[in-house]
Amino acid sequence: MSTQTEPKLVTQIDFARAGQITPQMKEVAEREHRDPEYIRERVADGRIAIPANIVHIKKGMRAFGVGEGLSTKVNVNLGISGDKADAAEEWKKVKIAEDFGADAIMDLSNSGKTRQFRQQLIDETPLMVGTVPMYDAIGYMEKPLVKLTKDDLFEVVRAHAEDGVDFMTIHCGINKSVTKIFKETGRLMNIVSRGGSLLFGWMEVTGNENPFYEFYDELLEICHEYDVTISLGDSCRPGCLYDSNDATETAEMIELGKLCKRAWAAGVQVMVEGPGHMALDEIAANMKLQKRLCHNAPFYVLGPLVTDIGVGYDHITAAIGGAISASSGADFLCYVTPAEHLCLPNAQDVLDGLMATKIAAHAADIAKKVPHARDLDDKMGQARRKLDWDAMWKCALDPVTGKKRYEESPAATEGTCTMCGKMCAVRTVNKVFEGTTIDLGMED
Ligand code: SF4
């Protein structure tokens, strides 16, 4: 009789490797029109992540799959800042995220006591919840950045894991070797990642190695205990077109690829974060390079923003880049709002940013031939041919805004809209095929 105890299966990747299909894998398979075995195989080798903390599962979260062959997921960022701490406004944003089809909410609160908001969010939302523990460390430990110790930082990570956070952005890849390349080669915008800049500052002042890199195995143990998916932060993502695909970004990506393998070996699910700002013609190559260097780990990108001068309209610059990135391999898009680079977004900014990103993700899913991705588009075509406005609202990504605009401008000719009125092309051609009178030019 064997005296060896079987390793405890905790994470989705543990179960997948043991050949077991979890309820979460089944749920993802059903929503994505895939066979459960298709999901299990890809969770086992890391091509799909199902960020679902065991604490959040017990609170009734929905399971979402991120990765190969699945629909592109969309994240909404929110959370209070030191300059604007209005929790009621943040709850409005949560409601918008849930009502308008976001898959994830990242709570980026970075001031004061953030735990209450985070715990309530996890209690109430069925969407994936992500955080960046580094943002929270100063407030949580009530210490200045440079006084924080490795144990302090890991205590914050543990608190987020215990609360039920499904995925955490942790900037493990910015180590001394990457910062050496950064300082040697230089950049126009230096480091624009908030977490990356905090760690860079901490490393430079203390002279220590990045603790999330140096003690990565310890970090993996915490993540394994709760099935937290590590979202490997890209501290050196380009903050302007000039810096994209440079030595610093690539050096960090190589490190992230190595860290992916170590996470999977420890039974921890992983995603990798990406740019940033990038010229349109560089995006597809960047996506392919990331997939190659990071062994096909799911790629979670911000845009990329395809120009630096769209200030006030960066939900559009990011959506253009998002459609290209997602159709070239990115699996998860972080939304960008019109307030990007300017201020904390308000509720309307959140809706505008979410819809722009949803459109980018959906356009990419059609191009990627994600199963059934085009069904609603085809239904919309049928509804428009019939001038069936109620059916159109049912197909629309944002039925509320569409219906409101239509009703604000009543058409004189039944079935049409005020764009062409009686000269409605659809109406005219329908009349031809129905054999009814084409009444144009026959007004009384
Ligand atoms: S009136 Fe013009 S824009 Fe409006 S439904 Fe008809 S064809 Fe389309």
Image (cartoon, rainbow, N blue to C red):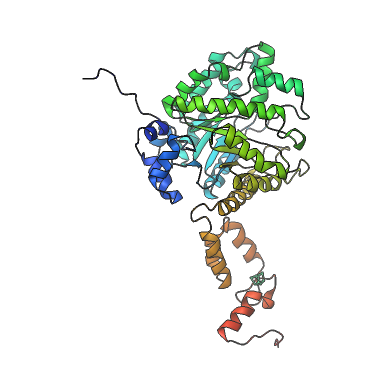
> Percent x, y for residue 6?
31, 23
Looking at the image, which is closer to me, 435 or 410? 435
In the picture shown, does residue 171 fall above or below 291? above
Choose top left, top right, bottom left or bottom right for residue 329: top right
Q: Going by the picture, which residue comes out furthest to the front?
A: 292
Q: Is residue 348 visible?
A: no
In the picture shown, does residue 3 fall above or below 363? above
The quadrant of the rendering that contains the N terminus is: top left
Choose top left, top right, bottom left or bottom right for residue 5: top left
Image quarter for ligand 1 = bottom right
> Percent x, y for residue 241?
75, 37
> Percent x, y for residue 403?
59, 62
Looking at the image, which is closer to me, 73 or 88? 73
Residue at left offset 45%, top offset 39%: 42
Choose top left, top right, bottom left or bottom right for residue 318: top right
Q: Is residue 248 visible?
A: yes
Question: In this figure, what is the number of numbered marks?
Answer: 0
The quadrant of the rendering that contains the C terminus is: bottom right
Looking at the image, which is closer to me, 120 or 260? 260
In the picture shown, does residue 377 fall above or below 136? below
Looking at the image, which is closer to me, 6 or 198? 6
> Percent x, y for residue 114?
55, 28
- On screen, residue 240 versus residue 413, left or right, reads right
